[in-house]
Amino acid sequence: MLNKKTQYAFRALEYMARRKAQGPVLIQEISETKKIPLKFLENILLELRKEGILDSKKGKGGGYLFRIPPDKIPLARIIRVMDGPIAMLPCVSLYFYERCSQCDEHNCGLHDIMITVRDANLRILENKTVADLAAEPERNIDADVLSE
């Protein structure tokens, strides 16, 4: 399950990608439009800037902008930056591998199934980008909340 931080990051990046041609986007604008708490959003965008995904410009006409084109940023990268491993078990993670203390990976049915799950997720998340988020039709977030 994606944590709230990752969901907010995707919402902010989607908004920025939709507005890319208009230049840097003010953090206040993203916060108000996407209904993301400002302090939380500041930390998210700062983290994405530190990872080299975003850049920021100060002064008049300033705000946040993409350092990497949105069509070159896989969703998997954002999840890893915001949330850590994509794999459901540490023993099948590609970037955050840890051996399970009570498990023999070579004779574990769960391990084998979770590799299949990880690979299926990665096939999608490595091939879908931030630009793909922006390509989806924009929906009213209040309507989404009411339908859940």
Image: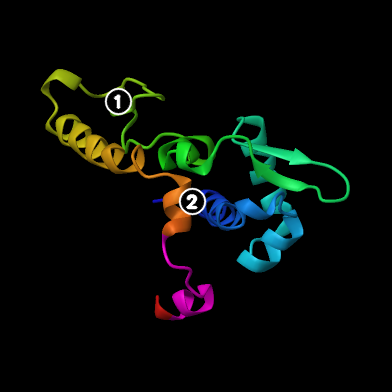
Residue under the point 21% across and 36% down: 114
At label 1, counting other C-alpha atoms closer than 10 Å, the crowd grade (few under 14, some 14-19, many 20 or more) is some
In the picture provided, is 94 more to the left or to the right than 78?
left
Name above or below for residue 16 compared with residue 89: below
Secondary structure beneath label 2: loop
Alpha carbon separation for disc pair 2 and 1: 21 Å
In the picture provided, is 44 more to the left or to the right than 39?
left
Q: Is residue 56 magenta?
A: no
Q: What residue would you read off at disc 1?
A: 91
Residue 111 image-quadrant placement = top left
Question: Is the image coloured rainbow, by chain, by secondary structure, or in one colour?
Answer: rainbow
The quadrant of the rendering that contains the C terminus is bottom left
In this rendered view, identify the residue nearer to me: 132 or 80.
132
In this rendered view, identify the residue nearer to me: 119 or 22.
22
Q: Which mark is residue 3?
A: 2
Q: Is residue 141 magenta?
A: yes
Q: Which mark is residue 104?
A: none
Extreme-front residue of the structure = 21
Secondary structure beneath label 1: helix
The spot of residue 136 in percent (x, y) is: 41, 62
In the picture provided, is 62 more to the left or to the right than 20?
right
Residue under the point 68% across and 52% down: 40
Residue under the point 32% across and 20% down: 99
Name above or below for residue 120 compared with residue 144: above
Magenta stretch? 136-146
The spot of residue 147 in percent (x, y) is: 40, 79
First in sequence: mark 2 vs mark 1: 2
Q: Three-letter amino acid code at disc 2?
A: Asn
The spot of residue 71 in percent (x, y) is: 46, 42
In this rendered view, identify the residue nearer to me: 1 or 79.
79
